[in-house]
Image (cartoon, grey):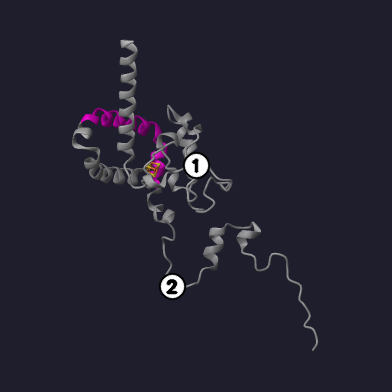
Amino acid sequence: MADTPIKPVPIGAGIPPAATGTTTQAAAVRKNAPKSDYKPADVSPQRRMQRSWSVRLWSVRHSRLLEWVYARLAETFLALHPLWKAIGYGRVEAPVKFVEKRVKGFMFDCRMCGQCILSSTGMSCPMNCPKQLRNGPCGGVRANGNCEVEPDMPCVWVKAWEGSRNMVKGDAILNVQNPVDQSLRETSAWLRVTAQAAAAREQAKTSTDVGAAA
Ligand code: SF4
């Protein structure tokens, strides 16, 4: 039997466009998806949130104002610590979480990670990054400042830097953040910060009292 001649294969043939460096992986997946009359408008959590980018971006533009509002909110919550404690943090969690989720969801597209670092990220929630990076952008930010994975979405870290430049304590963006503790998802960051601040305040007071008595 005669051997079938082997045809030369052009370099790059059969390799998705993403691998050739000419386009992104997301674009390649979209292009190669089966075609039908049904074209979903929302193909990822980020695209589902696209409608509210305008609010998210407004929050970044007004990061200084929101920094001030957040500081007042934190003071109020801390002042109410005796009340939270009397009622029981466990009992107030559900209503506080209900409000927190809706307010921060509307303002920042909050994902309720439970470890809020908005004040360190220019009021741009890092959990909206498709890679959920908490310490700066990946290497794939586009030339126009948009996300590598979601080409229509501004990179949350580009926005975080812009927002931080407006804030009084904006240099907090340089702090290294811990990895996300997934066990804290869907819990109230407001209550956690309040309880931790109250504990720190009581500890400082105890140390002062001990020092004065010595
Ligand atoms: S950092 Fe966490 S708690 Fe804060 S807005 Fe983002 S998802 Fe919500």
Disc 1 marks a residue whose amino acid type is Trp
In the orientation shown, which residue stands out farthest toward the bottom? 1
Residue 155: x percent and y percent? 50, 46
Left or right of 152 on screen, residue 9:
right
Place residue 204 in its image quadrant.
top left
Residue 106 rendering spot, x and y as whole percentages: 33, 46
The residue shown at (63%, 57%) is 22
Query: Could you tell me the amino acid type at mark 2?
Result: Asp
Q: Is 173 left, or right, of 69 in this rendering?
A: right
Dot 1 beta carbon under 8 Å from ligand 1: no
Quarter containing ligand 1?
top left
- The answer to whether mark 2 is within 8 Å of ligand 1 is no
Q: Which mark sits nearer the N-terminus, 1 or 2?
A: 2
Q: Is residue 38 visible?
A: yes
Describe residue 90's horizontal placement relative to residue 55 as left or right: left
Residue at disc 2, secondary structure: loop
Report the magenta residues as a range: 54-82
Quarter of the figure with residue 191: top left
Q: Residue at x 42, y 65 (%)?
A: 40
Considering only vertical position in the picture, is 27 above or below 77? below
The overriding secondary structure of the stretch rendered in magenta is helix
| Mark identifier at residue 37 | 2
Q: Is residue 55 visible?
A: no
